[in-house]
Amino acid sequence: MVSVATWNINSVRLRMPLVERFLAEQAPDVLCLQEIKCQEHQFPAKAFADLGYVHQAIHGQKGYHGVATVSRLPFREFSRHDWQDNGEARHVGVELPDHDGLIVENVYIPAGGDEPDREKNPKFGQKLDFLERMTRWAEAIDRPTLLVGDFNVAPLDCDVYDHKALLKVVSHTPIEVETLGLLQGAHGWVDLGRKHIPAPERNYSWWSYRTYWQGKDRGRRLDHMWASPDLAAQSRVHTIAEHTRNWEQPSDHVPLVTEFDL
């Protein structure tokens, strides 16, 4: 059994006590973090190593974005792609040679700004272009792969608290949903969140800091774990660590964890 977790931590240095608490509680074999918001030399590598996560692949930058994958299982760094073609640190992939050569791709897809219009808001166009480049990449994948991270898109009507109200809000617009769907189809990815928690069951991973999260429950499913079809068949348990949103100074995202028979 191998367990993999993904979490947009929204500053790993600020929230390292929460990460330590989560790892002590859940003990995933592999943890993929997004928005670490630090350069590689600033990453709390020793703190992770002290917890047993001695294998680390860090792709960081100053102050923004950044991804890191840490593991108790041996891995080698496998890939780094700049799908935005602008130097931002948004992806790192690793290979676990002792576990069927599993590839774990950790990605932080751009949020896309506030206006869902490529002409008025270049960030929105960059997000769509990022997804299109990922789609070309996914077409060539030829081995069992797990793609995880903050995709910044809630694809299904039931992946947001109010479908009609959010149709013109970035993260749930029809063009984003369509573009993400092309990425999913390019490799036949299986959405593990909906394999194990079928639509239309409630399934959120993000709540804005602007609203009391639990009282109004204005959630969106922005974080995802997708697997190659053969790998998806080996997934046994998928959980959402929603309780972490109640912790002191939480991230606005919560972790997802999937266990595989590997």
Image (spheres, grey):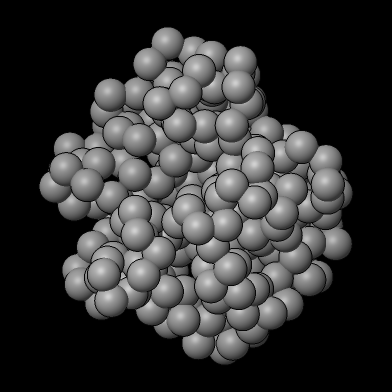
Q: Nearer the viewer, residue 242 or 164?
A: 164
Q: Quadrant of the N terminus?
A: top right
Q: Left of 52 or right of it: where is 148?
A: right
Q: Left of 77 or right of it: where is 113?
A: left
Q: Nearer the viewer, residue 136 or 4?
A: 136
Number of marks in the image?
0
Q: Is residue 115 above or below residue 14?
A: below
Residue 213 sits in which quadrant?
top right
Q: Quadrant of the C terminus?
A: bottom right
Q: Residue at x 44, y 40 (%)?
A: 8
Q: Residue at x 78, y 71 (%)?
A: 229
Q: Nearer the viewer, residue 217 or 196?
A: 217
Image coordinates of residue 51 in percent, x first then y, are 45, 25
Image coordinates of residue 248 in percent, x first then y, are 42, 11
Q: In the rendered image, is residue 94 in sight?
A: no
Image coordinates of residue 2 in percent, x first then y, are 70, 46
Q: Residue at x 20, y 68 (%)?
A: 87
Image coordinates of residue 50 in percent, x first then y, are 39, 24
- State the residue lying farthest toward the top: 248
Q: Is residue 2 above or below residue 119?
A: above
Q: In the rendered image, is residue 162 in sight?
A: yes
Q: Nearer the viewer, residue 172 or 78?
A: 172
Q: Left of 88 or right of it: where is 77?
A: right
Q: Residue at x 54, y 43 (%)?
A: 6
Residue 59 sits in which quadrant?
bottom left
